[in-house]
Amino acid sequence: MPIKNFHILYSLFLLMFLASENTFAQQPEKYSPYTENGDSIMMIVLSDIPVYPPTFKNEKQIMEYNKLIRDVKKTLPYAKMIYATLIETCEYVETLPKNQREAHIKRMEKDLFEQYKPVMKQMTLTQGKLLIRLIDRECNQTSYDLAKAFLGPIRAGFWNFFAGMFGASLKSTWEPEGKDAEAERIVRLVEAGVL
């Protein structure tokens, strides 16, 4: 092995070692010692990072892609929060007596409406439609099905009709292989911390 290649390899190893020492104090859960035959080795668990080839043909597609990134970054946290709230509410409602369940759900609906109405008003129509589909992605149920389960079929139908007046549908589904393929890529990159 030529000495030049050895120095490059040694420098890379030293750089990786110093970087891991510096980050060790910040993220201890990703590092764990591995011992074999009395020899300790530091094991670093790296998360997977998806890599996708660029598919842009012109400047307009790049601008649309950047807009989709912005929309996903704005709506994905709300879809995840809705999923967490849904799980928490379902678990709590199961502990309540049947006569108190409906009152609790109405109270939750009122509180959530008051808290998130200003945020939802700030969203564009495109972001609202994306949020509806992201809810389907996160919860594995359409927004209509969730509304129907908690509010009943009549009120769910009303909200679906209301969304329909703006060109949206609560029955929209997430299609990661179809129309949402590009958004699925962005969601995976955001979840991996790349975007």
Image (cartoon, rainbow, N blue to C red):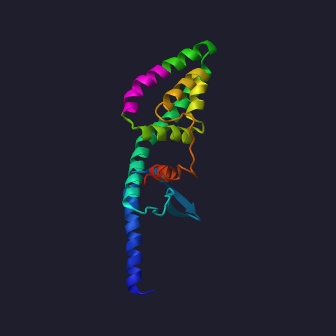
Q: Looking at the image, which residue sits at the far bottom?
A: 2
Rendered view: 84 above or below 186: above
| Quadrant housing the N terminus | bottom left
Residue 178 visible? The answer is yes
Give how far across and how far down residue 117 sits, in percent.
Answer: 40, 27
Give how far across and how far down residue 180 sits, in percent.
Answer: 53, 49
What residue sits 50% from the left and 36% below the top? 168
What residue sits 52% from the left and 18% below the top? 106
Give how far across and how far down residue 172 sits, in percent.
Answer: 56, 38
The stretch drawn in magenta includes residue 21: no
What residue sits 50% from the left and 51% below the top? 188
Front residue (pair 128, 50) = 128
What residue sits 49% from the left and 18% below the top? 107
The residues colored magenta run 109-121
The answer to which quarter of the image holds residue 103 is top right
In the image, is 159 to the left or to the right of 97? left
Give how far across and how far down residue 135 sits, in percent.
Answer: 53, 38
Rendered view: 133 above or below 146: below
Front residue (pair 9, 41) = 9
